[in-house]
Protein backbone atom coordinates (compact mmCIF):
# COMPACT_ATOMS: atom_id res chain seq x y z
CA UNK A 1 0.00 0.00 0.00
CA UNK A 2 1.18 3.54 -0.75
CA UNK A 3 2.05 5.67 2.23
CA UNK A 4 -0.58 8.38 2.44
CA UNK A 5 0.88 11.82 1.80
CA UNK A 6 -1.07 15.00 1.26
CA UNK A 7 0.37 16.38 -2.00
CA UNK A 8 -0.36 19.93 -0.85
CA UNK A 9 1.80 19.61 2.26
CA UNK A 10 4.67 17.40 1.05
CA UNK A 11 7.98 18.58 2.43
CA UNK A 12 11.40 18.14 0.89
CA UNK A 13 12.59 16.47 4.08
CA UNK A 14 10.06 13.65 3.48
CA UNK A 15 12.34 12.45 0.65
CA UNK A 16 15.68 12.65 2.44
CA UNK A 17 17.88 9.69 3.40
CA UNK A 18 21.48 9.14 4.44
CA UNK A 19 23.70 7.96 1.60
CA UNK A 20 27.37 7.12 2.26
CA UNK A 21 29.62 8.78 -0.30
CA UNK A 22 31.27 5.48 -1.19
CA UNK A 23 27.96 4.23 -2.63
CA UNK A 24 28.20 6.73 -5.49
CA UNK A 25 29.50 4.96 -8.61
CA UNK A 26 32.24 6.76 -10.50
CA UNK A 27 32.48 4.08 -13.22
CA UNK A 28 29.90 1.69 -14.63
CA UNK A 29 29.86 -2.07 -14.18
CA UNK A 30 31.86 -3.95 -16.81
CA UNK A 31 30.36 -5.44 -18.83
CA UNK A 32 27.29 -3.20 -18.68
CA UNK A 33 24.91 -6.05 -17.94
CA UNK A 34 26.99 -7.09 -14.89
CA UNK A 35 25.22 -4.38 -12.87
CA UNK A 36 23.14 -5.51 -9.92
CA UNK A 37 19.35 -5.34 -10.04
CA UNK A 38 17.03 -4.92 -7.06
CA UNK A 39 13.50 -6.20 -7.68
CA UNK A 40 10.86 -4.20 -5.82
CA UNK A 41 7.57 -6.06 -6.38
CA UNK A 42 4.11 -4.65 -5.79
CA UNK A 43 3.63 -7.26 -3.08
CA UNK A 44 6.26 -9.16 -1.16
CA UNK A 45 9.87 -8.58 -0.27
CA UNK A 46 12.57 -6.91 -2.33
CA UNK A 47 15.01 -9.38 -3.86
CA UNK A 48 18.60 -9.13 -5.08
CA UNK A 49 19.37 -10.00 -8.70
CA UNK A 50 21.62 -8.99 -11.57
CA UNK A 51 20.68 -7.31 -14.84
CA UNK A 52 21.00 -10.62 -16.69
CA UNK A 53 18.11 -11.87 -14.53
CA UNK A 54 15.81 -9.22 -16.00
CA UNK A 55 14.22 -11.51 -18.63
CA UNK A 56 13.17 -13.95 -15.90
CA UNK A 57 11.64 -11.12 -13.86
CA UNK A 58 9.54 -9.97 -16.80
CA UNK A 59 6.58 -11.67 -18.44
CA UNK A 60 6.18 -12.67 -22.08
CA UNK A 61 4.35 -9.82 -23.75
CA UNK A 62 5.72 -7.10 -21.48
CA UNK A 63 6.65 -3.98 -23.43
CA UNK A 64 9.86 -2.17 -22.52
CA UNK A 65 9.93 1.48 -23.62
CA UNK A 66 13.43 2.82 -24.37
CA UNK A 67 14.61 6.42 -24.73
CA UNK A 68 16.67 6.59 -27.93
CA UNK A 69 18.21 10.04 -27.36
CA UNK A 70 21.97 10.47 -27.71
CA UNK A 71 24.16 12.61 -25.43
CA UNK A 72 25.71 15.75 -26.90
CA UNK A 73 29.17 16.91 -25.83
CA UNK A 74 27.42 19.71 -24.01
CA UNK A 75 30.02 20.88 -21.47
CA UNK A 76 31.94 23.85 -22.90
CA UNK A 77 34.79 25.87 -21.40
CA UNK A 78 35.75 29.29 -22.71
CA UNK A 79 36.08 32.89 -21.67
CA UNK A 80 33.90 35.98 -21.52
CA UNK A 81 35.65 38.66 -23.50
CA UNK A 82 36.76 41.71 -21.57
CA UNK A 83 34.40 44.64 -21.23
CA UNK A 84 35.79 48.15 -21.37
CA UNK A 85 34.45 48.77 -17.87
CA UNK A 86 36.26 45.94 -16.12
CA UNK A 87 39.15 45.29 -18.47
CA UNK A 88 39.65 41.53 -18.19
CA UNK A 89 38.63 38.22 -19.73
CA UNK A 90 36.77 35.84 -17.42
CA UNK A 91 36.93 32.05 -17.65
CA UNK A 92 33.43 30.59 -18.11
CA UNK A 93 32.08 27.04 -18.03
CA UNK A 94 28.67 26.32 -19.49
CA UNK A 95 26.39 23.33 -19.76
CA UNK A 96 23.86 23.38 -22.56
CA UNK A 97 20.45 22.22 -21.41
CA UNK A 98 17.81 23.02 -24.04
CA UNK A 99 17.97 24.03 -27.69
CA UNK A 100 15.39 26.72 -28.47
CA UNK A 101 16.36 27.60 -32.06
CA UNK A 102 18.82 26.42 -34.71
CA UNK A 103 21.43 28.82 -33.28
CA UNK A 104 20.23 29.31 -29.69
CA UNK A 105 20.54 27.24 -26.52
CA UNK A 106 19.51 27.75 -22.93
CA UNK A 107 22.54 27.09 -20.71
CA UNK A 108 23.72 27.03 -17.12
CA UNK A 109 26.92 29.01 -16.59
CA UNK A 110 29.64 29.41 -13.99
CA UNK A 111 30.34 32.04 -12.82
CA UNK A 112 26.86 33.20 -13.79
CA UNK A 113 27.20 36.38 -11.74
CA UNK A 114 29.89 37.61 -14.13
CA UNK A 115 27.64 37.45 -17.19
CA UNK A 116 25.15 39.99 -18.49
CA UNK A 117 23.23 40.62 -21.68
CA UNK A 118 25.44 41.42 -24.65
CA UNK A 119 28.54 39.65 -23.35
CA UNK A 120 30.50 37.56 -25.86
CA UNK A 121 31.76 34.13 -24.81
CA UNK A 122 34.45 32.45 -26.91
CA UNK A 123 35.05 28.68 -27.13
CA UNK A 124 37.88 28.47 -29.65
CA UNK A 125 36.37 28.95 -33.12
CA UNK A 126 32.88 28.85 -31.61
CA UNK A 127 31.41 31.91 -29.90
CA UNK A 128 28.10 33.08 -28.50
CA UNK A 129 26.36 36.23 -27.33
CA UNK A 130 24.42 36.32 -24.05
CA UNK A 131 20.90 37.24 -25.16
CA UNK A 132 19.13 37.07 -21.81
CA UNK A 133 19.20 35.75 -18.25
CA UNK A 134 16.09 34.07 -16.91
CA UNK A 135 14.44 34.32 -13.52
CA UNK A 136 15.44 30.71 -12.76
CA UNK A 137 19.13 31.48 -13.30
CA UNK A 138 19.93 30.10 -16.74
CA UNK A 139 21.03 32.04 -19.82
CA UNK A 140 20.00 32.23 -23.47
CA UNK A 141 23.02 32.11 -25.80
CA UNK A 142 22.99 32.89 -29.53
CA UNK A 143 25.88 31.16 -31.30
CA UNK A 144 27.84 32.18 -34.40
CA UNK A 145 26.74 28.98 -36.15
CA UNK A 146 23.45 27.18 -36.58
CA UNK A 147 21.90 23.85 -37.41
CA UNK A 148 24.24 21.01 -38.28
CA UNK A 149 27.27 23.33 -38.32
CA UNK A 150 26.57 24.32 -34.69
CA UNK A 151 26.01 20.71 -33.66
CA UNK A 152 29.35 19.73 -35.20
CA UNK A 153 31.13 22.68 -33.56
CA UNK A 154 29.72 21.74 -30.15
CA UNK A 155 30.82 18.12 -30.62
CA UNK A 156 34.31 19.37 -31.47
CA UNK A 157 34.65 21.99 -28.72
CA UNK A 158 32.76 20.29 -25.91
CA UNK A 159 33.10 17.32 -23.62
CA UNK A 160 30.57 14.86 -22.27
CA UNK A 161 28.55 16.46 -19.46
CA UNK A 162 29.07 13.94 -16.68
CA UNK A 163 26.89 14.60 -13.62
CA UNK A 164 28.43 16.94 -11.04
CA UNK A 165 28.81 14.17 -8.46
CA UNK A 166 31.13 12.35 -10.90
CA UNK A 167 32.82 15.34 -12.55
CA UNK A 168 33.82 16.71 -9.14
CA UNK A 169 35.71 13.47 -8.38
CA UNK A 170 37.50 12.75 -11.65
CA UNK A 171 38.04 14.05 -15.17
CA UNK A 172 36.03 12.97 -18.17
CA UNK A 173 38.10 10.52 -20.25
CA UNK A 174 37.91 8.42 -23.39
CA UNK A 175 36.07 5.58 -21.62
CA UNK A 176 33.15 7.89 -20.95
CA UNK A 177 32.59 8.42 -24.67
CA UNK A 178 31.28 4.86 -24.81
CA UNK A 179 30.14 4.35 -21.21
CA UNK A 180 27.82 7.37 -21.18
CA UNK A 181 25.82 6.40 -24.28
CA UNK A 182 23.15 3.74 -24.49
CA UNK A 183 23.43 0.99 -27.11
CA UNK A 184 20.17 2.16 -28.70
CA UNK A 185 21.00 5.91 -28.90
CA UNK A 186 20.10 7.19 -32.38
CA UNK A 187 22.70 9.20 -34.30
CA UNK A 188 20.05 11.65 -35.54
CA UNK A 189 18.86 12.38 -31.99
CA UNK A 190 22.05 13.83 -30.48
CA UNK A 191 20.57 16.49 -28.25
CA UNK A 192 20.57 15.24 -24.66
CA UNK A 193 22.90 16.82 -22.13
CA UNK A 194 22.65 13.85 -19.78
CA UNK A 195 22.25 10.14 -20.45
CA UNK A 196 19.01 8.23 -19.86
CA UNK A 197 21.04 6.14 -17.46
CA UNK A 198 18.76 3.15 -16.92
CA UNK A 199 19.45 2.31 -20.55
CA UNK A 200 23.20 2.10 -19.96
CA UNK A 201 22.84 -1.46 -18.59
CA UNK A 202 21.67 -3.00 -21.87
CA UNK A 203 23.90 -5.11 -24.10
CA UNK A 204 23.31 -7.12 -27.24
CA UNK A 205 23.15 -10.36 -25.26
CA UNK A 206 20.62 -8.93 -22.80
CA UNK A 207 18.45 -7.63 -25.64
CA UNK A 208 18.62 -11.06 -27.28
CA UNK A 209 17.59 -12.75 -24.03
CA UNK A 210 14.65 -10.36 -23.64
CA UNK A 211 13.50 -11.08 -27.19
CA UNK A 212 13.76 -14.84 -26.57
CA UNK A 213 11.60 -14.35 -23.45
CA UNK A 214 8.90 -12.69 -25.58
CA UNK A 215 9.50 -9.19 -24.24
CA UNK A 216 8.79 -6.48 -26.80
CA UNK A 217 10.37 -3.02 -27.12
CA UNK A 218 9.31 0.41 -28.32
CA UNK A 219 11.26 3.66 -28.46
CA UNK A 220 10.42 7.21 -27.47
CA UNK A 221 12.63 10.30 -27.35
CA UNK A 222 13.19 12.76 -24.53
CA UNK A 223 16.20 15.04 -24.80
CA UNK A 224 17.42 15.11 -21.22
CA UNK A 225 18.22 18.60 -19.90
CA UNK A 226 20.82 19.62 -17.32
CA UNK A 227 17.90 20.63 -15.12
CA UNK A 228 17.74 16.98 -14.15
CA UNK A 229 20.72 17.65 -11.84
CA UNK A 230 19.32 20.78 -10.22
CA UNK A 231 18.44 20.41 -6.54
CA UNK A 232 14.97 21.11 -5.22
CA UNK A 233 15.37 24.33 -3.23
CA UNK A 234 11.84 24.76 -1.87
CA UNK A 235 10.87 22.94 1.32
CA UNK A 236 7.28 22.89 0.06
CA UNK A 237 7.62 20.39 -2.79
CA UNK A 238 4.63 21.76 -4.70
CA UNK A 239 6.51 25.05 -5.26
CA UNK A 240 9.33 23.43 -7.25
CA UNK A 241 9.43 24.33 -10.95
CA UNK A 242 10.71 21.73 -13.41
CA UNK A 243 12.70 22.76 -16.50
CA UNK A 244 10.94 21.80 -19.72
CA UNK A 245 12.38 19.05 -21.94
CA UNK A 246 11.45 18.16 -25.52
CA UNK A 247 9.95 14.72 -26.13
CA UNK A 248 8.46 12.74 -29.01
CA UNK A 249 6.48 9.55 -29.57
CA UNK A 250 6.14 8.28 -33.12
CA UNK A 251 2.94 6.83 -34.56
CA UNK A 252 4.47 3.35 -34.62
CA UNK A 253 5.56 3.49 -30.97
CA UNK A 254 2.20 4.89 -29.90
CA UNK A 255 0.52 1.96 -31.67
CA UNK A 256 2.76 -0.57 -29.91
CA UNK A 257 2.11 0.98 -26.50
CA UNK A 258 -1.64 1.34 -26.99
CA UNK A 259 -1.93 -2.24 -28.27
CA UNK A 260 -0.11 -3.54 -25.20
CA UNK A 261 -2.43 -1.60 -22.90
CA UNK A 262 -5.56 -2.75 -24.72
CA UNK A 263 -4.39 -6.38 -24.48
CA UNK A 264 -3.68 -6.12 -20.76
CA UNK A 265 0.09 -6.41 -21.17
CA UNK A 266 2.46 -4.40 -19.00
CA UNK A 267 4.15 -1.24 -20.23
CA UNK A 268 7.51 -0.75 -18.51
CA UNK A 269 9.54 2.37 -19.28
CA UNK A 270 13.31 2.05 -19.02
CA UNK A 271 14.25 5.13 -17.03
CA UNK A 272 12.41 8.09 -15.62
CA UNK A 273 12.81 9.99 -18.91
CA UNK A 274 10.85 7.35 -20.82
CA UNK A 275 8.25 7.29 -18.03
CA UNK A 276 7.84 11.09 -18.06
CA UNK A 277 7.44 10.99 -21.84
CA UNK A 278 4.70 8.36 -21.64
CA UNK A 279 2.79 10.09 -18.87
CA UNK A 280 3.12 13.50 -20.56
CA UNK A 281 1.65 12.23 -23.81
CA UNK A 282 -1.11 10.06 -22.36
CA UNK A 283 -4.78 10.94 -22.41
CA UNK A 284 -7.47 8.66 -21.05
CA UNK A 285 -4.85 5.90 -20.63
CA UNK A 286 -3.84 6.02 -24.30
CA UNK A 287 -0.73 7.49 -25.89
CA UNK A 288 -1.08 10.42 -28.28
CA UNK A 289 1.71 10.43 -30.89
CA UNK A 290 3.50 13.72 -31.48
CA UNK A 291 5.98 16.12 -29.89
CA UNK A 292 5.83 18.49 -26.95
CA UNK A 293 7.84 20.26 -24.28
CA UNK A 294 7.14 18.61 -20.95
CA UNK A 295 7.72 19.91 -17.44
CA UNK A 296 5.69 17.16 -15.79
CA UNK A 297 6.52 16.81 -12.09
CA UNK A 298 5.46 13.45 -10.68
CA UNK A 299 5.12 13.21 -6.90
CA UNK A 300 3.12 10.97 -4.53
CA UNK A 301 -0.56 11.31 -5.28
CA UNK A 302 -0.05 11.22 -9.06
CA UNK A 303 -2.33 8.78 -10.93
CA UNK A 304 -0.31 6.88 -13.54
CA UNK A 305 -2.05 6.42 -16.87
CA UNK A 306 0.29 4.08 -18.76
CA UNK A 307 3.16 2.93 -16.53
CA UNK A 308 2.87 -0.51 -14.88
CA UNK A 309 6.48 -0.85 -13.69
CA UNK A 310 9.78 0.98 -14.10
CA UNK A 311 13.40 0.01 -14.61
CA UNK A 312 15.58 2.77 -13.20
CA UNK A 313 18.79 3.52 -11.32
CA UNK A 314 19.05 4.62 -7.68
CA UNK A 315 18.50 8.34 -7.25
CA UNK A 316 19.71 11.20 -5.07
CA UNK A 317 18.15 12.07 -1.72
CA UNK A 318 15.54 14.86 -1.97
CA UNK A 319 15.55 14.66 -5.78
CA UNK A 320 12.58 14.91 -8.12
CA UNK A 321 13.46 11.41 -9.34
CA UNK A 322 13.20 9.87 -5.86
CA UNK A 323 9.83 11.63 -5.57
CA UNK A 324 8.80 10.02 -8.87
CA UNK A 325 9.64 6.46 -7.80
CA UNK A 326 7.91 7.11 -4.47
CA UNK A 327 4.81 8.10 -6.41
CA UNK A 328 4.95 4.80 -8.30
CA UNK A 329 5.65 2.39 -5.44
CA UNK A 330 4.87 4.36 -2.28
CA UNK A 331 7.25 6.40 -0.15
CA UNK A 332 7.50 3.87 2.66
CA UNK A 333 8.26 1.00 0.27
CA UNK A 334 10.94 3.04 -1.52
CA UNK A 335 12.51 4.13 1.76
CA UNK A 336 12.76 0.48 2.77
CA UNK A 337 14.13 -0.59 -0.60
CA UNK A 338 16.77 2.13 -0.58
CA UNK A 339 17.77 1.27 2.99
CA UNK A 340 18.27 -2.33 1.83
CA UNK A 341 20.26 -1.18 -1.21
CA UNK A 342 22.55 1.00 0.90
CA UNK A 343 23.12 -1.76 3.47
CA UNK A 344 23.80 -4.24 0.63
CA UNK A 345 26.38 -2.03 -1.09
CA UNK A 346 24.40 -1.27 -4.24
CA UNK A 347 26.00 1.44 -6.37
CA UNK A 348 23.99 4.64 -6.82
CA UNK A 349 23.29 7.25 -9.49
CA UNK A 350 24.16 7.47 -13.20
CA UNK A 351 26.85 4.77 -13.37
CA UNK A 352 25.30 2.70 -10.59
CA UNK A 353 23.06 -0.34 -10.32
CA UNK A 354 19.39 -0.68 -11.25
CA UNK A 355 16.05 -1.53 -9.73
CA UNK A 356 12.87 -2.93 -11.22
CA UNK A 357 9.94 -1.26 -9.48
CA UNK A 358 6.40 -2.56 -9.88
CA UNK A 359 3.59 -0.04 -9.38
CA UNK A 360 1.84 -0.29 -6.01
CA UNK A 361 -1.63 -1.79 -6.19
Image (tube, rainbow, N blue to C red):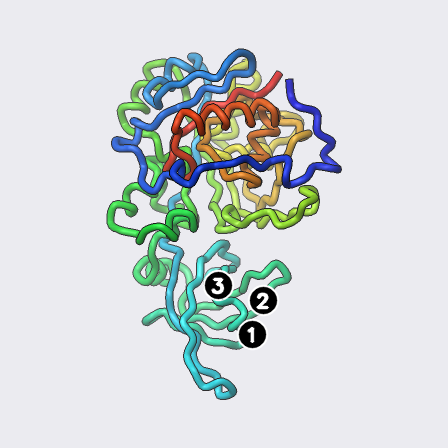
Q: Quadrant of the N terminus?
A: top right
Number of labelled discs?
3
Question: Which residue is at 47% across, 45% downward?
Answer: 223
| Residue annotated with mark 3 | 109
Instruction: Judge whether 334 appears above or below 104 on screen.
Output: above
Instruction: Judge whether 171 appears above or below 274 on screen.
Output: below
Badge 1 marks a residue whose secondary structure is loop
Is residue 253 left or right of 184 when viewed as pictured?
right
Instruction: Judge whether 297 appears above or below 306 on screen.
Output: below
Question: Which residue is at 50% across, 27% downward?
Answer: 339
Q: Quadrant of the C terminus?
A: top right
Q: Position of residue 38 (x, y in %)?
A: 43, 22
Badge 3 marks a residue whose secondary structure is strand
Q: Is residue 353 visible?
A: yes
Question: Which residue is at 52% across, 67% downward?
Answer: 112
Q: Position of residue 327 (x, y in %)?
A: 61, 29
| Residue annotated with mark 1 | 117
**How many C-alpha atoms fall within 10 Å of the one at disc 2: few (<14), some, or many (≥20)?**
some
Mark 3 or mark 2: name the one nearer the start of the chain: 3
Q: Is residue 259 visible?
A: no
Badge 2 marks a residue whose secondary structure is strand
Mark 2 to mark 1: distance in Å?
Answer: 7 Å
**How many C-alpha atoms fall within 10 Å of the one at disc 1: few (<14), some, or many (≥20)?**
few
Do tag 2 and tag 1 residues touch (Cβ < 8 Å)? yes
The front one of 250 and 74 is 74
Mark 2 or mark 1: name the one nearer the start of the chain: 1
Mark 1 to mark 3: distance in Å?
Answer: 13 Å
Q: Residue 318 falls in which quadrant of the image? A: top right
Between disc 3 and disc 2, the foreground one is 3
| Residue annotated with mark 2 | 133
Instruction: Judge whether 277 appears above or below 76 on screen.
Output: above
Mark seen at residue 345: none
Amino acid sequence: MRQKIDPATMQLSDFDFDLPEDRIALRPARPRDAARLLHIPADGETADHGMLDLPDLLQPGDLLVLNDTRVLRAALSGFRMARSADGGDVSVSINLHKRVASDCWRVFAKPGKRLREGDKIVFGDLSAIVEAKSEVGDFLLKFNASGEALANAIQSAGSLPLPPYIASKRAVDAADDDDYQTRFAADDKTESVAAPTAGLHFTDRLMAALKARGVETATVTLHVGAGTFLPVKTENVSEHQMHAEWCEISDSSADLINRAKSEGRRVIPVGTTALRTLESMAKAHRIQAGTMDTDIFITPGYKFQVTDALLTNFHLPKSTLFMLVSALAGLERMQGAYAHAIASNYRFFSYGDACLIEAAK
